[in-house]
Each structure stands twice: as structure tokens, then as C-alpha cells.
Amino acid sequence: MTQEEINSTNWSQSVAGVCVRDGKVLLARHTYGSGQGKLIIPGGYVKFGEIPEETLVREYLEETGVTVKAGKLLGIRFSARDWYAVFAAEYVAGEARSDGDENSEVVWMDVAEALQDETVPGLTKTMIECALKGDGFELTPYQTTKPGNYLYI
């Protein structure tokens, strides 16, 4: 990672996505940190000036070679210093492949198998289950008719 990439990243905001296609979920085996060796849903940190949906699309493509579109917000986790949001990720195009850096493999795994696999962490399993239920919040793009940042208009 370059110094420019480090400086442009908002390390307190991150997103991930659950992409289910033909009964299989896309998972990446991470090579670092607390996720090392685990199969988790792809995602990453938001860059300054980027909205979470853009981050999801960028991170998926970088890490897996798959293009997705952000769907419903499935879950969000807050702490006093950061947040992590998980979207349904709708498959658009691409062949799954490892990025050779942040993950060692990217696989389409049968959903039932993923929910039983010991290398798939609990949070990933919970988000897969949320995606299967179809619950979540509709993604509502920010729109305003007035200049500036008006939260309620």
C-alpha cells in the first residue's frame, strides 16, 4: 500500500458485502490480521470522499475480480471509534480470483456449506443469513433540491 493510499483512507469506516448467486456465496480467505486464514465476505475501508456503496464496488473488484452493485443494507456495527456496514452485493459480472495480496483464494461456496464451515467466522455467517432472509433496509441515495448538505430535505 502506498503512502497516498494510506493517507486517503478513512480507517474508521469500512464496508463489506454478501454476494449470493446460484446458491453459492462469494468468500475470500484473508492473509492478515484477525481474519488471517478465515473465509470472509469481501470488503474494506472507505476512502475520503467516497460513499460506502462506491467502496463496496471498488473493494469487490480489487479483491475478487467480481463487479457488484450495492443492494440493501443488511447490518451495521458501531463502536465509539468506527463503523462497519454490510450490504447485499448483487452480482454484475466477472470471474472470481484472488488478488494475491489481501487474500489467498476467492471461492464461490455453497451457502449451506459456508454456514457450517469452521473457517467462516460468526459475523460472516450472520450476514449470510441476513442476506438469505432478504431483510434489510432499502438503499436510498442522498438527494437534495437545495445546495449544501441538508440532512432532512
Image: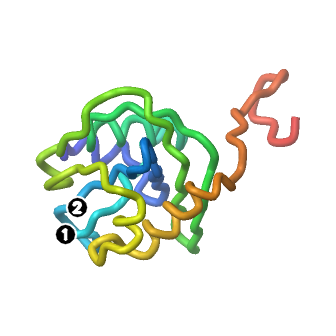
Give the total number of marks visible in the rendering: 2
Q: Is residue 122 above or below residue 8?
A: below
Task: Specify whether residue 43 is in view.
Answer: no
Circle 1: is it few (<14), some (14-19), or many (20+) Cα within 10 Å?
some
Q: Is residue 74 above or below residue 99?
A: below
Q: Nearer the viewer, residue 12 or 14?
A: 14
Is residue 117 rendered to the left or right of residue 86?
A: left
Looking at the image, which residue is at 68% across and 54% down? 136
The residue type indicated by label 2 comes to His
Q: What residue is shown with label 1?
A: 37
Residue 43 location in percent, x, y?
A: 39, 51
| Image quadrant in which you'd find residue 97 | top left
Residue 12 location in percent, x, y?
A: 47, 60
Q: What residue is shown with label 2?
A: 30
Q: Which mark is residue 48?
A: none
The residue type indicated by label 1 comes to Gly
Task: Specify whether residue 106 is in view.
Answer: yes
Looking at the image, which residue is at 69% across and 33% down? 141
The colour mode here is rainbow
Which of marks 1 and 2 precedes in the sequence?
2
Residue 26 location in percent, x, y?
A: 35, 49
Q: Nearer the viewer, residue 50 or 99?
A: 99
